[in-house]
Amino acid sequence: MTDTQDIAALIDEMGRAARAAATDLAFAPASQRARALELAADVVEMKRGAIMSANARDLAYGRDKGLSPAMMDRLMLDEARIAGIVAGLRAVAAQPDPLGAVLAEWDMPSGLHIRRVRTPLGVIGVIYESRPNVTADAGALCLKSGNAVILRGGSESFHSSAAIHGCMIEGLRGAGLPETAIQLVPTRDREAVAAMLRAVAHIDVIVPRGGKGLVGLVQAEARVPVFAHLEGICHVYVDGAADLDKARRVVLNAKTRRTGICGAAECLLIDRAFYARHGAVLITDLLAAGVEVRAADELSAIPGTVEASPEDFGREFLDMIIAAKLVDGVDGAIAHIRRYGSSHTESILTEDDAVADRFFARLDSAILMRNASTQFADGGEFGMGAEIGIATGKLHARGPVGAEQLTSFKYLVTGDGTIRA
Amino acid sequence: MTDTQDIAALIDEMGRAARAAATDLAFAPASQRARALELAADVVEMKRGAIMSANARDLAYGRDKGLSPAMMDRLMLDEARIAGIVAGLRAVAAQPDPLGAVLAEWDMPSGLHIRRVRTPLGVIGVIYESRPNVTADAGALCLKSGNAVILRGGSESFHSSAAIHGCMIEGLRGAGLPETAIQLVPTRDREAVAAMLRAVAHIDVIVPRGGKGLVGLVQAEARVPVFAHLEGICHVYVDGAADLDKARRVVLNAKTRRTGICGAAECLLIDRAFYARHGAVLITDLLAAGVEVRAADELSAIPGTVEASPEDFGREFLDMIIAAKLVDGVDGAIAHIRRYGSSHTESILTEDDAVADRFFARLDSAILMRNASTQFADGGEFGMGAEIGIATGKLHARGPVGAEQLTSFKYLVTGDGTIRA
C-alpha cells in the first residue's frame, strides 16, 4: 500500500462508505448514537490492557525514531489517560443531542409554515498527529452530531489509534449502526492525507488537529473546506481604566496557567495611562513567575526584561515567554491586534464600559473577552462539552467547535396544496 | 489591461481596499448602511436616463455579438425594470438590520457571561452574467449585511453595470461610507474571474449568479469558498395518500408557473398506489397545459407522452418539459431522489403524517416541502427579503441566501477578573 494510485483508490472507497453511512446516521435516533458511544467506552475500559500493549509498540517505534520527550509524552497512554478517554466518551454520550432541533419556525402569508431544523454535515475528515486519544474524542463528537468520520492519525500513534478505533467499531456494532460510520485510514503513507484533502466528493469538511506545520499544510492544500486555526496569537490589553488587582490576576493566568494551549496569551499590551499610574507591576509579576518578558520601548528598561525584536510580535511562543508593549489607549491596542493578531482570542482589562464596547465592536476575533483570562478559550469552558478544536475562519464554525458546530440545517416547509401565484 | 499580471495586481489592490472597507463597515451603524441604500435608490431613479443610455450601448454590443433573444431580454433595462431596481434598493434598506443581534447568551459556573453576536462575513465576491440589476441587488445585500463586495458583471452588461455601480457609489459617499465598500471590476477580461477565484487572502466567499456553465466553472476552480447551487433538479412526489385536488394544483404550479427558475419541478414521481386509484390525471393535466411529459415505464403508454430516455432523470430542463416515473411508495421516491436529486428542493404530496415525516427525515435537500409547490423556493417567499441566490452546499449558508446568511458571528465574553483554575 505505497502506490499513490492505490492510496487514492483506498480513500475513494472509504469516502463512498462514509457517505453511505452518513445517509443512515442522519436519521438514526439519538439514543442509538449515544448507545454506541457508551458501549465504546465500556470496551475501551475492558480492553485497556490491549490498548496499552499497542501503545507500547508505538512508544518503542517513537524511541527508535528519536522523538522528543514532549512528543513521547503526547503519545503515551497510561491507566489515567485511558480513564480520561472512557470518561470523555461517556460525557459526549450524555450531552444533549444536537440533531433535529428546530432552530427557527415561522408562518408566511402564502400559508406556508417554515421550519429550519438541524441536520448533520455529512462526512468529516479529521487529520491529527501523535495524541491517540483524538481517535476516541473526534470519533465521538462526529458520531454525536450524526456525521460519518474518516480519521487519519499520526504515524507515531498508529497502533494505539488502531486499538482505540477497534473499540469504537465494537460500540457501533453493538448499537446496530454501520461500522463505516467511524473509519481509520489503515496506512501510515502520507499520500493518504493528500488524497483526503482533495476528496471534495466524499468529505464535507476537514478538521486538522495538530501543530502549525500540519494545519498550515492542510489549509494550503485542501480543496475540501477546513475548520481550523493556524495559530493562537492571543493578546491581553490592559487599559488605563483597568482594575489593578483584576489585571494582575488575569495577566498572570492568561500567560502561565498553561503555556502550550492555543488560548495562552502571547502578547501583553499596556495602555500608557495604566503604566503611568501603576508602573511595572504587571511585568514584575510575570518575571517573578519565571516568564521571559520580551519588552519593547520603555518597558525594556525594566530590569529582568529582554529587548523584544520585531518578530516577537505576532508570534506564538507556546512557552513561558511573552511579548510586551506600551500602546496609546484602546485604539492603539486595536491597531496592534489588527496587524498582529490571528483572530483567535483577545482580552481587554477595563472598568470602562465604553472602552470595552469599542474593543468588542472594532475587533473581529472569534472570541473577545473583558476582564477574563484568554485561557478560557475552550469548548468545555464555553459549556459545549468536548470540542474538536477552535476555528478562526468566519464560515460556518467559529470559536470552539463542538458537536453543535459540526451540524448543518435544512428547511421543512408545509402547506395545504399551496401554490405560488 | 489585458496582461494577466496586471489583472492579478488589479484584483489584489481591489481586495485590499475591500478588506479595509469591510473593517470600517463592521462597526458602521445600521442607519448609515441603510441611508447609503436609500440614497443610491434616489440616484438610480434620478439617473435612469443615463442608465438606459449605457444600456443601449450594451444592447448594441449584444446585437453585434449575436446574443440570443433570451440573453438580450436579460440584458435589457427599461423604465419598469429600473423602477424595480429602485424598489429593490429601498426594500433592502427597510429590512431589519441583521448585525449585532445576540444569537445566544448564557452564564457559566466560572462566572463568565458568554454572548454570541452576529457580525459581517467580510468581503464577498459576486460573479454574474448579463442581468445588470444584480449590480444593485447584490451590492445592496452585501452592504446591508455589513460586507464589502467586489462585483464582476458579465461583459455584455459592462456599461449598464458601471452606470448602476456609479449610483451605488454616490449612495455610499452621501452616507459617509467608504466608496470601496462596493467595487465593480473595471475590465471585461475574463482573467479577472480567475484572479477572484484564487483571492483567498482578500475574498471570504464567492457567490456566482448565472447558468450552469458559470457556476460549474466557479465551483471547480475556486480556492475561495463558494455559496451556490449548480442545478435545481426539483422533484415532486405524489404519494398514495395524496389528496387528488391538492396534487393536481401543486404539480401543475410546480412545473408551469415559471419554468426558467431553479425551483421549477423537473421530475414527477407518482406512487403506484396513487396511479392505481387515480390513473393518468396528473399527466393529462400537464399535457393539457402544454408540457412535454417524458414518461418512463407504464406512464409512457399514456397518449401524448414521450418515452423518457435514461438521461431525462437528473436533468434540469428549465422548460415546459418534465420527466415522470412510477415509484413504489415513499421509499421508492426517496431512493430515486437520492440518486438523481441536486439537494435543492423536493416536495411530497400526502395526507399521511408518518409518510411525510419519513420523506423529511430521510432526504437531505436544502428545502423539503409537503403539499406545497417547489416554486416557493425563493428568499422572498421565505420572508428573507431579497436573496442573492440559493445554496445547496451544507456549510454556512443553505437554501435562500439573504442578508442574514451573509453574516458570521463572534463570541463576547465578560468576567470580573475571572481566571481559569
Image (spheres, coloured by chain):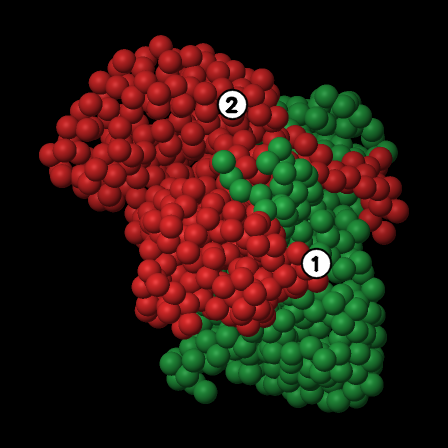
Chain colours: A green, B red
Residue for point 65% across, 30% down: B100
Badge 2 element: helix
Quote the CA–CA distance across marks 1 and 2: 38 Å
Residue B227 appears anywhere in the view: no
Q: Which residue matches tag 1?
A: B353
Residue at 40 percent of width and 42 percent of height: B258
Same chain check for tags 1 and 2: yes
Residue B278 shown left or right of residue A84 in the figure: left
How packed mark 2 is, by other alpha carbons closer than 10 Å (few <14, some 14-19, many 20 or more), is some
Q: Nearer the viewer, residue B9 or A333?
A: B9
Using the image, name the chain to which the residue with label 1 belongs. B
Q: Nearer the viewer, residue B303 or A6?
A: B303
B83 is higher (above) or lower (below) than B135: above
Amino acid type of the residue that numbered disc 1 sits on in the rendered structure: Asp
Q: Residue at x 37, y 54 (%)?
A: B287
In the current view of this chain or complex, which residue is farthest to the left?
A: B64
The spot of residue B322 in percent (x, y) is 38, 57
- What residue is at 60 percent from the left and 27 percent from the top? B97
Q: Reading the chain from its start, which is encountered first: label 1 or label 2?
A: 2
Side of B416 relative to A148 (left or right) = right
Is A210 rendered above or below residue A256? below
Residue at mark 2: B91
Mark 1 lies on a secondary structure that is helix
